[in-house]
Amino acid sequence: MNQRLDTSATLSNSTINLRYTAAMRKRVQIALAFLLVAIAGVIAWQVLHLREPAYQGKRLSVWLQNYSPDGDSPEVDDAVRTMGTNVIPTLLGMLRAEDSKLRQILAALGFHYTATC
């Protein structure tokens, strides 16, 4: 009789352990799926993210801050030419960009802000 009780207790414990294992397995699968989706999102963002072209360690926007429309900035001209057609999407994005209302008000009052990198 004791042997029967021991067997049923063992079966009961193994059933609980199997349920626990199945529940844990499901949680691990969900966590792994979430992790894979997060990694795929980061990779997609890195691939699709537009990066600003650079030349000699300076980004295009830094070069353009030193630009003079009277033709007195040959190093800026050289940098833009060297970066080639890679600058076109960035330049188009800069042309489409609009200043915020605060920046427009400050510009109207005579304050000028230039970003330094």
Image (spheres, rainbow, N blue to C red):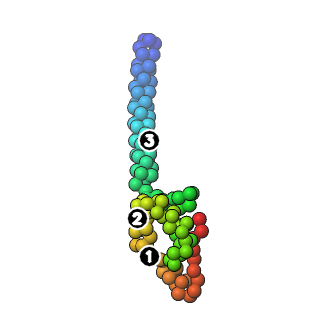
Q: How far apart are marks 1 and 2 (CA)?
A: 18 Å
Figure check: 80 above or below 5: below
Q: Is residue 110 left or right of residue 82?
A: right
Figure check: 108 above or below 95: below
Q: Looking at the picture, which amino acid does disc 3 mark?
A: Ala
Secondary element at tag 3: helix
Q: In this view, does 97 lie to the left or right of 56?
A: left
Quadrant for residue 25, please give it.
top left
Where is residue 104? Give x, y as percent: 50, 82
Secondary element at tag 2: helix
Where is residue 100? Give x, y as percent: 48, 77
Residue 65 in view (yes/no): no
* Residue identifier under label 1: 98
Q: Earlier in the sequence, mark 2 or mark 3?
A: 3
Secondary element at tag 1: loop
* Residue identifier under label 3: 31
User: Quick one: label 3, few (<14), some, or many (20+) residues within 10 Å?
Assistant: few
User: Which residue is at the front of the view, 59 or 73?
Assistant: 73
* Residue identifier under label 2: 88
Q: Looking at the picture, which amino acid does disc 2 mark?
A: Ile
Q: Residue at x 57, y 74 (%)?
A: 114
Q: Which residue is drawn at 46% across and 63% down?
A: 81
Q: How far apart are marks 3 and 1 (CA)?
A: 42 Å
Figure check: 100 above or below 9: below
Q: Which residue is drawn at 44% across and 76% down?
A: 98
Of marks 2 and 3, the one in the foreground: 2
Where is residue 20? Give x, y as percent: 43, 31
Q: Looking at the picture, which amino acid does disc 1 mark?
A: Glu
| Quadrant placement of the C terminus | bottom right
Q: Is residue 26 left or right of residue 61?
A: left
